[in-house]
């Protein structure tokens, strides 16, 4: 494992500084970096040159000399000039929280889409930061005013990075079109979509597996569940079938985190679109985490950024098996569960059904006998209340969504 020093700046604006530093330590651990020391400065605002004050930079130099770490990690995203100045002054590799998160995403990415998204985010982060990376090359101008080899290499690398970003965006767009076609096909089937969202490591994948187990599907394909940050990057969708023929599609996407890099949100927009297309969100919360309220706020910020804040939501307080006393629920649409111990999963399914039914209406349809395909679809995917065989066709009473009522309007009696 590499050895690292953590550096944090506690400003008046940083309300959750201690939690942020603890989370940074966890991010470093996920990147196999052993943290040997922390340096903290209390200051009203960062400096333009070093982010921390010059006195703290000198203190950091002494720590580096005595502890001999491999790198220094800052809690907030540094500007290109701050990284350049710090590396020149400290003579050691300097990275920030964004680099750690990008590195974790790169390690976790498995599918083509996830790899493209991570590579795009990394390239866009690196583009303004390639300057200053060629100290060994001369930057002196010759008598004719031509650029030195360092500047030539810098311009070449910038051009290569820009070309790479253009190609990655093009490749990603091709994958995105396939995903959007699949999503459009799902929506045309009028099966409700329920999307899991929440802070990273809140138990979304464990909950997905618990709901799969509760489903009447013969084929049950479970997803990876692991106690780690960002265990799930790929979007996974499965059909949850209940005994009363009520079906919905359940999707799981990437988890969120405080200070989620903007590059990542932009690169993962196509994946996060799965959330915006949902009929219902299950916001999974690790209630055993003392900072769960702050985590809810962090998730809400990202949901607002991707314009998903107005989608109906059930707040699922998970991991109650790890706490002694349950907190008071602040929102009506909330439930305590333990996905690991399968506690209150059936109650949650009842809540899901209740929420999905809010956008539906009970109607009667008279289907001609030559429209047996529609009746077969209803039998397979809907909860039919009553069926009567009449002279002119099949009289069916069932619950349909607004879109389905419009689609089958000609048969409504």
Image (cartoon, helix red, strand yellow):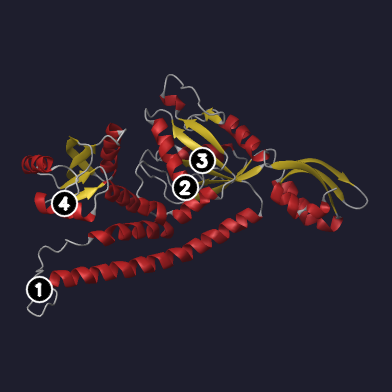
According to the image, label 3 marks what residue? 208
Q: Nearer the viewer, mark 1 or mark 2?
A: 1
Residue at image position (26%, 67%) is: 158
| Cα distance between the residues tagged 4 and 3 | 40 Å
The picture quadrant where one finds residue 372 is bottom right
The answer to the question of whether label 4 and label 1 lie on touching residues, with beta carbons closer than 8 A, is no
Q: State the image coordinates of residue 282 (x, y, percent, origin top left).
A: 53, 39
According to the image, label 4 marks what residue? 93
Q: Residues within 10 Å of mark 1 (few under 14, many from 20)?
A: few
Q: Nearer the viewer, mark 3 or mark 2?
A: 2
| Cα distance between the residues tagged 3 and 2 | 11 Å
Q: Nearer the viewer, mark 2 or mark 4?
A: 4
Q: Nearer the viewer, residue 347 or 161?
A: 161
Q: Residues within 10 Å of mark 4 (few under 14, many from 20)?
A: some
Does residue 165 appear to the left or right of 64 in the view shown?
right
According to the image, label 1 marks what residue? 141
Which of the two discs, 4 and 3, labels the residue nearer the N terminus?
Answer: 4
Does residue 54 appear to the left or right of 347 in the view shown?
left
| Cα distance between the residues tagged 2 and 4 | 33 Å
According to the image, label 2 marks what residue? 253
Extreme residue toward the top, this view = 325
Q: Nearer the viewer, mark 4 or mark 3?
A: 4
**Mark 4 falls on what kind of element?**
strand
Which of the two discs, 3 and 2, labels the residue nearer the N terminus?
Answer: 3
């Amino acid at each position: 494992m590499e050895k690292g020093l953590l550096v944090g700046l506690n400003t008046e604006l940083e309300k959750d500084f201690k939690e942020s530093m603890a989370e940074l330590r966890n991010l470093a651990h996920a990147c196999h970096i052993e943290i040997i020391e922390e340096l903290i400065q209390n200051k009203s605002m960062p400096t333009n040159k070093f982010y921390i004050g010059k006195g703290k930079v000198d203190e950091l130099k002494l720590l580096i000399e005595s502890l001999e770490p491999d790198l220094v990690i800052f809690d907030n995203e540094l500007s290109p000039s701050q990284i350049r100045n710090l590396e020149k002054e400290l003579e050691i590799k300097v990275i920030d929280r964004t680099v750690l998160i990008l590195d974790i995403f790169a390690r976790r990415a498995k599918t083509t889409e996830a790899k493209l998204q991570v590579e795009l985010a990394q390239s866009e982060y690196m583009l303004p930061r390639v300057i200053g990376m060629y100290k060994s090359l001369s930057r002196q101008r010759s008598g004719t005013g031509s650029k030195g080899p360092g500047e030539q290499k810098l311009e070449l690398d910038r051009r290569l990075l820009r070309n790479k970003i253009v190609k990655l965006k093009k490749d990603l767009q091709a994958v995105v079109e396939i995903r959007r076609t699949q999503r459009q096909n799902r929506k045309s089937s009028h099966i409700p979509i329920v999307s899991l969202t929440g802070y990273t490591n809140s138990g979304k994948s464990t909950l997905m597996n618990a709901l799969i187990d509760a489903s009447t599907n013969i084929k049950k394909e479970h997803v990876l569940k692991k106690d780690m940050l960002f265990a799930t990057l790929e979007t996974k969708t499965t059909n949850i079938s209940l005994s009363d023929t009520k079906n919905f599609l359940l999707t799981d996407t990437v988890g969120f985190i405080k200070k989620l890099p903007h590059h990542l949100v932009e690169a993962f927009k196509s994946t996060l679109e799965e959330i915006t297309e949902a009929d219902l969100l299950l916001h999974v919360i690790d209630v055993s985490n003392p900072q769960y309220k702050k985590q809810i706020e962090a998730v809400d910020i990202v949901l607002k950024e991707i314009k998903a804040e107005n989608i109906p939501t059930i707040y699922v307080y998970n991991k109650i098996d790890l706490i002694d006393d349950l907190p008071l629920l602040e929102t009506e649409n909330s439930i305590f569960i333990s996905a690991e111990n399968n506690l209150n999963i059936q109650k949650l399914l009842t809540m899901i059904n209740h929420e999905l039914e809010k956008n539906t209406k009970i109607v009667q349809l008279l289907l001609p006998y030559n429209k047996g395909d529609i009746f077969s679809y209803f039998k397979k995917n809907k909860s039919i209340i009553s069926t009567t065989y009449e002279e002119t066709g099949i009289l069916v009473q069932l619950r349909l969504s607004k879109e389905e009522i419009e689609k089958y309007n000609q048969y409504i009696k």
